[in-house]
Amino acid sequence: MRPAARHPYLEWSGPIAFAHRGGTGAFPENTIAAFDDAVGLGFTYLETDVHATSDGVLVAFHDPDLSRTCGRPGDIANLPWSEVGDARVAGEHAIPTLDELLERYPEARFNIDCKSDEAVAPLVAALRRHACLDRVAIGSFSDLRLRRLRRELGPRLCTSLGPAAVASLVSGAPVPLAGLAAQVPVRQGPVPVVTDTFVRRAHRRGLQVHVWTIDDPVEIARLLDLGVDGIMSDDLRALRDVMVARNLWN
């Protein structure tokens, strides 16, 4: 049974459809064009990543450097915003700031992956500046970063479980789990993560289960049958089509 929402961010009738990095099928990831496309398709939940420039500007960008998506060298943490702001994703699209996203999509809910230690303080400042904790959840692959964010922003912050807590949930260890959702892959290497047992165990502890990154319609359907509470996808049209067919789109 789906657990009761324990935070305004998680209050949604049915499974949550997340636009992973804004979606990557129609437009390059983490660009205004991608996020506009997602919102135009009816997505309310937008997933993104944040890094901080050397002068503390928080940018919506997955990688620590510009090479893969912008075709030029440069670590974001070592570059000022004046240089990062000149880079173009796929040669065309400007890199958005988190401020820009929060202002452009006031009705959207954001799942934000804090990608670096340098991004923690600017992220705290941005969330306070926009007074948006009810429509934001924070995730990270760093337990330390999550602890810092929870300490700074307090109990009104919605976060996912960190890596150590996810490992404990997979193993069934009876330890306290900080966070309100397990945001996980189907497998971690050879180890199955999202199983019937895992979903039931999470739900018994009041945790939602959000799975990334799923683009195959058959796998989306299987996970929905398993009872997961959210799916993150790069293929927004595939995810929407499956949910529409099941009368789950809202």
Image (cartoon, rainbow, N blue to C red):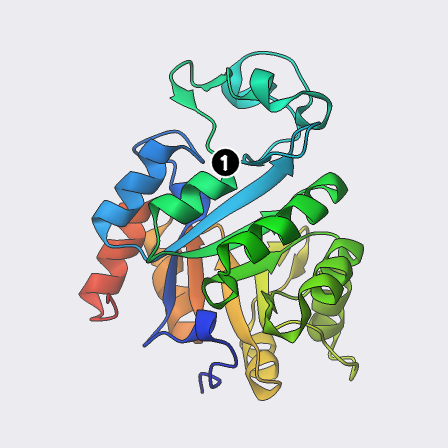
Q: Residue at x 40, y 57 (%)?
A: 219
**Left or right side of 40 for 117:** right
Q: Is residue 228 visible?
A: no
* Residue 71 x %, y %: 54, 13
The quadrant the N terminus occupies is: bottom left
Closer-to-camera residue (212/87) = 87
Q: Is residue 74 above or below residue 246?
A: above
Label total for image = 1
Q: Residue at x 34, y 64 (%)?
A: 221
Closer-to-camera residue (83/203) = 83
Q: Is residue 84 above or below residue 15?
A: above
Q: Quadrant of residue 101?
A: top left
Question: Which residue corresponds to mark 1?
Answer: 97
* Residue 111 x %, y %: 50, 55
Q: Secondary structure at mark 1?
A: loop
Q: Residues within 10 Å of mark 1 (few under 14, many from 20)?
A: many
Q: Quadrant of residue 76?
A: top right
**What kind of residue is marked 1?**
Thr
**Left or right side of 94 for 118:** right
Q: Is residue 208 above or below residue 3?
A: above
* Residue 148 x %, y %: 77, 59
Q: Residue at x 24, y 67 (%)?
A: 250
* Residue 184 x %, y %: 59, 60
Closer-to-camera residue (79/45) = 79
Q: Is residue 71 visible?
A: yes
Q: Quadrant of residue 147?
A: bottom right
View extreme (front): residue: 129
